[in-house]
Image (cartoon, rainbow, N blue to C red):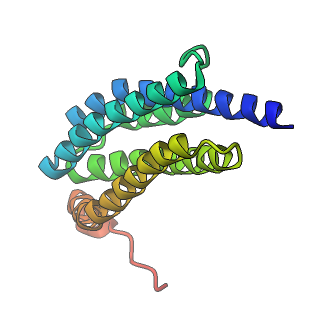
Amino acid sequence: MKGSLEKLYVDELKDLFSAEKQLTKALPKMAKAASSEDLRKGFEEHLEQTKGHVQRLEEIFTMLNAKAGGKKCVGMEGIIQEGAEVMGEDYEGAVMDAALISAAQRVEHYEIAAYGTVCGYADLLGESDQAALLRQTLEEEKETNEKLTELSQEINVAAEHDASEDQPETKRRPRRAA
C-alpha cells in the first residue's frame, strides 16, 4: 500500500513540477497583456514566486532521490491554452484585465487543489519536511488567489463601466434585479 501511495505521490509531484514550469512561460505573456499596472506587477511577482515553487519541488525530488521531469501536466496545459485564447480576443483595457484575472484564478484553484492533495500524501507517508515545503507553496497559492480576488473587485467594476460606454445608449441592456 505504502509503495503505491508513494508512487502516486511522486507522479503528482511530477505533474505539479510540469505545471509550474509551464506557468513560468505563461506568466510573462499575461503580464504583457495586462493594462492595469497593479495586475502586471502581480503577474511579475507571481512569476518570481513560481520560480521558487519549482526550486522547492526540485528540493523535494532530491529528498526522494527521484527525477523531477518526465511528465506533462495536461490539466495546466489546458488552463493555459484557455488563457491564451482569452488573450487572443479583442478585449481591451479593464475588460482584458478582468479576463486575465479569471484565467489566473483558474490556475490558482488548480494549484490549490493539487498542492492540498500532495500535502496530504506527504503527511500520510511521514514526509514531514516535504509536507512543510509543500504547505509553504500551498499558502502562497492561496495568497495569490486572494490578491487576484481583491484586484478583480476594482477591475471588474471598471470593465463593466468600459463595456457600457462602448454600447450606444439605445442598445444598452437593462440591468436585471437579482
Q: Position of residue 109 (x, y in %)?
A: 51, 51
Most foreground residue, 55 or 167: 55
Most foreground residue, 174 or 122: 122
Q: Is residue 51 above or below residue 114?
A: above
Most foreground residue, 166 or 81: 81
Task: Tell whether 87 sits left or right of 158.
Answer: right
Q: Is residue 41 above or below residue 20?
A: below
Task: Tell whether 171 sits left or right of 45.
Answer: right
Q: Is residue 176 above or below residue 79?
A: below
Task: Tell whether 148 sits left or right of 1.
Answer: left
Extreme right residue here? Answer: 1
Task: Tell whether 8 sits left or right of 175.
Answer: right
Splitting the image into 4 quarters, where does residue 161 fall? bottom left
Quarter of the N terminus within the rendering? top right
Q: Position of residue 167 (x, y in %)?
A: 27, 60
Q: What residue lies at 35% left-to-right and 50% top-to-bottom? A: 101
Splitting the image into 4 quarters, where does residue 46 fall? top left
Q: Is residue 94 visible?
A: yes
Q: Is residue 34 visible?
A: no
Q: What residue lies at 71% left-to-right and 48% top-to-bottom? A: 124
Q: What residue lies at 39% left-to-right and 35% top-to-bottom? A: 53
Extreme bottom residue here? Answer: 177
Q: What residue lies at 74% left-to-right and 28% top-to-bottom? A: 7
Q: Is residue 116 above or below residue 160?
A: above
Q: Position of residue 22 (x, y in %)?
A: 44, 25
